[in-house]
Amino acid sequence: MKKIILFMVVVLLFAASVTTAQAETVKMPLSKLTAVQTPDLRCTSGEFTIHVPVPDRWDVKRATVSVSYVSSPALTPDRSYILATFNGRPIGVKKFGTVGLPGRFDGNVDPALFEPGYNTLNISVAQHYTLECERPCSPELWTKLELEKSTIEIEYTLKPVPLKLSEATEAIFDPKITPAGDITIVMQGRDSESVTLSGIVASGIAKRFDYRKVYFNVSKDLTDGKDNIFVGTGAEASALLAKYGQTFPKVDGPFIKLMHMPLKSGGVDKTRALLVLTGRNKEDIKIAAETLTSMTIAFPGTSELKVTGFKMPEIKQYGGRLVLDADKEFDFKTLNIPTTTYEGFNPPPMDFNFRLPADFLIKQNQYAELVLNFAYGAGLRPDSVLLIMLNGKTIRSIHLNNTGGDMIEKYKINIPTYLFKPGGNIITFASILSVNAQECDLFQTRNMFVTVFDNSTFYFPQMGHFVELPALELFMLNGFPITRWPDGFGSTIYLTEKDDQYISAAYNLIGLISQKNGYPAFGVTITYEKPDKYDGELIVIGHVAGVPEEYRKLAPLKLTNPLEVPYPVVRSWEEKKTFAYSTQEGGLGPDEGMFMQFASPYKEGRSVLFLTAATDDDVLKLSKALLDPEVQGEVKGDLVMVEFREPKYKVTSLKVGESYTSGKLGNIGMIDYYLSSYPKLYIAVVIGLIIVLAFLAYYLMMRLRKRRTVEGGKGA
């Protein structure tokens, strides 16, 4: 009997120390996994690939894929079908049946097929419109995938977090986590310096999540069911963990330790992590935070780390993720564009993504230079071409007119710089290949190819940094103007109160900035004191009633009663809006917020960004809304109103305030700037000069005529 009781006690103690992994289910539309919403599959065979993220810590138990589509009514049902494969293994196939009507098929995915990383879901079609000879790319051969109506559902449990810093940080801060990351930052102090230090941690965490949304919550205690990051002194860490029956070693310098998540009920949750960043003082904590933020290789392999020093490399202005240096020639290999071959009737295109600084002064009379080295096969028809597209618009087609094939070196293409835009740009290479053959001929496709080599080059000329603000769309491009220095140096976030929701909102914005620019925001300071004199960029966060009147008066929508509210009534062909102004007593209501930008009252050329709502809860909701890609795509101008509706946010963007400029023209003169930026002014100046020259010529001719007349009279 004693043995049975002892056995039961041991079982209970073990159950208390280790939590049972609970299965979770995530279901999402396939449209969330790709930028293309309705892919068009053409020709006798077409395919579309979607990359399905699977975090390292997921143990997949069950998965299903449901695909919705519409096919051409001209297809022959008996010979046309749609097929889905997952990592190369078939999961579903269906004949089109009743063509021309919406169709759907479901497939179960074997959990053993899932691998950590990005798994390949491939949807392909075989399409025919006749039982006899047919043209391989006849216009009748098409199927549209409706990805918004297509879904993938995955049921999974969480694997135990490995107690290795190098592995765990990759598993915890994993951009493959769907639909969003959720991190609790635990800290005991709420002073400006402590909050700023934790902001460095939030910045580094968000950067690790890449473009995946990550929400931050601030607490003084650990939160069950989430990964927690503790930031504070060794004494504070020991006191907190003692409440959970855990001991913490004495620290004598910057220290990082990884643990399984302690539970209030006792024991630990091995599927969740507690990461402790600590030291003797704030200087130690800062070194630990910067070290964690900079860990980018599989080292160290231990669960704890003592740091003895930290040094950041020098940075330059306007750096960041995929930012292209101007006035410098790059080969494709350096730009991560491999040698690529386009083969067959309908080869997929290749994109080259890069970014230009958000405040680049793109002039009208300069050219970027693209120099291609490429080869193409023999037997192509003379109408075969290689297409060059910029931001979705075709700008050049290269004629592949040598029927014997050819290899072309240093094919130069000059692209006017006004076709580019500040922020992200995409150059796309695509091909249209055809051969001289009849419908019933046996087609050979191996000779239908174009290969673009990675020793091709791209050059973008030097530009000045000078931009007209306000423009919140630039903030959504890469965090500009906060990221004028990539680390946010000289920028301040002013919180109007010591409130955990405001701190969480600040960390959400810091995370957004870091993800957009691809660099940790080491240089951003968080304060509770209203700046009296300030030379940098400023972000103000607080509910309306708590924000100093000075900022409310300067905002595009002056949030002081009585309100003068702009209502757009007319929009011109030049995208300019005319406003009617209503003076009223009112204000923001529940479940809505405002994000605004205006000129800094402290220094010319600097900006204030203003995040506000009626309540503290709505301030936090607004910061989370700004992490949504669909909201980001609608943010522009200087006044953005967001309504927190289900299932989608409603966004209204306006440009109502006064404009101001920021930046330096560099070697570009002010006259050159205005003439290149305002073509109508340039034309007016040219016409004015012609009139002046014509008048001067007329004056000189009349004077010469008068002189000759006088001289002729004297001679007589």
Image: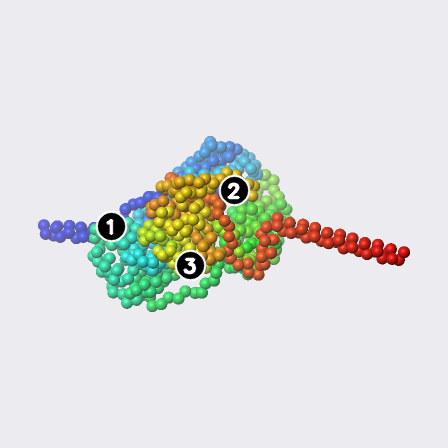
The C terminus lies in quadrant: bottom right
Task: Classify residue 691 as left or right of residue 548.
Answer: right
Q: Is residue 115 visible to us here?
A: no
| Residue at figure coordinates x 32%, y 65% from the top left | 284
Residue 103 place in picture, x, y as percent: 44, 34
| Residue at figure coordinates x 48%, y 58% from the top left | 318
Mark 3 Cα-neighbour bin, 10 Å: few <14, some 14–19, many ≥20 = few
Residue denoted by label 3: 533
Q: Secondary structure at mark 2?
A: strand
Residue 542 place in picture, x, y as percent: 36, 50
Q: Quote the CA–CA distance across marks 3 and 2.
A: 34 Å
Residue denoted by label 2: 577
Q: Quote the CA–CA distance across marks 2 and 1.
A: 59 Å
Residue 270, relative to residue 128: is it above or below?
Answer: below
Mark 2 Cα-neighbour bin, 10 Å: few <14, some 14–19, many ≥20 = some
Query: In this figure, which colouring scheme has been used for the structure?
Result: rainbow
Q: Quote the CA–CA distance across marks 1 and 3.
A: 53 Å
Q: Choose mark 1 or mark 3, whichever is in front.
A: 3
Residue denoted by label 1: 19
